[in-house]
């Protein structure tokens, strides 16, 4: 999650005063290296590897960063409670633009304010901390989902995964754009795969094709492995195909947010990695919102770029003939 560094440092200082010499457990944020901290995040970012559930520990207090997806915050609080000793303290902090100012809602849930800063708030749970869940599978849900080229299936989902157990409009348009395409004769890479809707649809459309997916969210990858057991998935921050076969088709509904803030660099870095890693005769096909200006980035990286389809605020772009580094202008 995106947490303002100055805000995180202020929270850390406040907790150091409240819990001198005690072990803290940080969820979905990175505390300063000085101090007694252990941490867990479902998201892989930089040198921090995401995992689907924390390794058991017994910290004196836990601090969770507010997620813009409220169900994901509930999961993170439960994970923290599993790693805080009985009777320890449990905190929730967040920046104002993520909704932490809606204090009445948090007060009704049992939180009190212990610190208010210029751009955020630190809350402490008033009850006794006791682990109420045994692990991630307590949050597992299964519901029907209509997957293009497959039909209705039982779909595994967890709080905070992309699209909340649904097929979002952008992904649906991307999959619809494949209806008249011939079968792929090589590897298909599903970048930012989420719980695996694209991988499941591609596997149904072209039986026998090899599909590889990756996502920064370890819990989403865990769901994808259950939803599409025949495919391979990896938890990775960015392009995950560093070795092996070059993909003939790369498909993606790429992320444009880091926390609440829009971050086009995530998508633009993906386009650059696709330029380097795509098979010479392969294709990159991606869906973005209309207002996202990816065409210049695509044309600087590929010789052939076209708009495949546009509908409902989304555009599907296709790019072929990658411009390798030596030949780039």
Image (cartoon, rainbow, N blue to C red):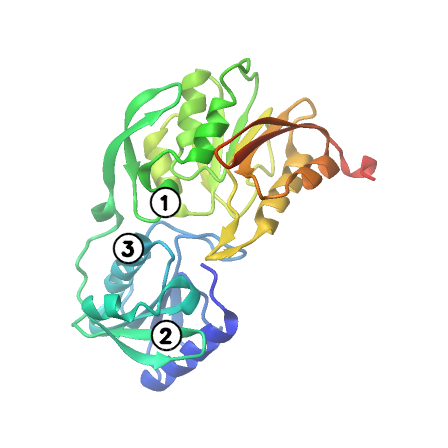
Q: Give SS at disc 2.
A: strand
Residue 269 position in % (x across, y down): 63, 46
Residue 231, picture quadrant: top left
| N-terminal-most mark, 2 or 1 | 2
State whether residue 220 is above or below residue 123: above
Query: Image check: 73 left or right of 33?
Result: left
Give 44 or 161, whichever is nearer the viewer: 161
Mark positioned earlier in the residue sequence (3 or 1): 3
Label 2: which residue?
121
Q: Which residue is drawn at 47% across and 74% down?
A: 7
**Whether label 2 touches label 3, CB < 8 Å:** no
- Number of residues whose C-alpha sits closer than 10 Å to that of mark 3, classed few (under 14), some (14–19) or many (20 or more): many
Number of marks drawn = 3
- Residue 27 location (% of width, % of height): 37, 63
**Mark 1 packing: few (<14 Cα in 10 Å), some, or many (20+)?**
some
Give the number of the disc on residue 161: 1
Can the viewer see residue 231? no
Label 3 secondary element:
helix
Residue 292 at x, y percent in the picture: 59, 44
Tell me the mark number nearer the camera, choosing from 2 and 3.
2
Q: What residue is shown with label 3?
A: 75
- Disc 3 to disc 1: CB gap under 8 Å: no
Image quadrant occupied by the N terminus: bottom left
User: Residue placed at 47% from the left, 65% from the top?
Assistant: 3
């Amino acid at each position: 999650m995106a947490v303002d560094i100055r805000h995180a440092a202020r929270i850390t200082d406040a907790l150091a005063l409240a819990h001198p010499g005690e072990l803290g457990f940080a969820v979905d944020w990175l505390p300063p290296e000085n101090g007694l901290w252990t941490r867990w995040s479902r998201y892989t970012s930089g040198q921090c590897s995401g995992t689907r559930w924390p390794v058991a520990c017994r910290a004196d207090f836990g601090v969770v960063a507010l997620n813009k997806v409220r169900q994901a915050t509930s999961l993170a609080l439960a994970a923290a409670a599993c790693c805080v000793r009985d009777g320890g303290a449990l905190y929730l902090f967040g920046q104002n633009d993520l909704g932490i100012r809606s204090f009445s809602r948090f007060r009704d849930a049992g939180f009190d304010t212990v610190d208010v800063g210029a751009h955020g708030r630190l809350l402490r749970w008033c009850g006794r901390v006791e682990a109420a869940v045994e692990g991630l599978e307590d949050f597992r849900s299964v519901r029907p989902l209509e997957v293009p080229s497959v039909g209705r299936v039982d779909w595994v989902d967890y709080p905070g995964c992309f699209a909340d157990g649904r097929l979002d409009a952008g992904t649906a348009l991307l999959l619809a754009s494949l209806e008249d395409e011939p079968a792929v004769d090589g590897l298909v890479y599903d970048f930012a795969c989420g719980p695996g809707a694209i991988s499941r649809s591609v596997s149904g459309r072209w039986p026998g094709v090899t599909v590889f997916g990756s996502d920064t969210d370890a819990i989403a990858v865990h769901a994808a492995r259950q939803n599409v057991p025949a495919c391979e998935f990896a938890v990775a921050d960015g392009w995950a195909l560093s070795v092996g076969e070059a993909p003939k088709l790369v498909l993606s509904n790429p992320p444009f947010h880091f926390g609440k803030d829009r971050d086009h660099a995530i998508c633009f870095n993906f386009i650059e990695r696709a330029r380097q890693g795509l098979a010479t005769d392969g294709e990159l096909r991606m869906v973005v919102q209309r207002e996202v200006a990816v065409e210049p980035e695509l044309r600087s990286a590929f010789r052939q770029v076209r708009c495949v389809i546009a509908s409902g605020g989304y555009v599907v772009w296709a790019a072929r003939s990658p411009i390798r580094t030596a030949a780039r202008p």
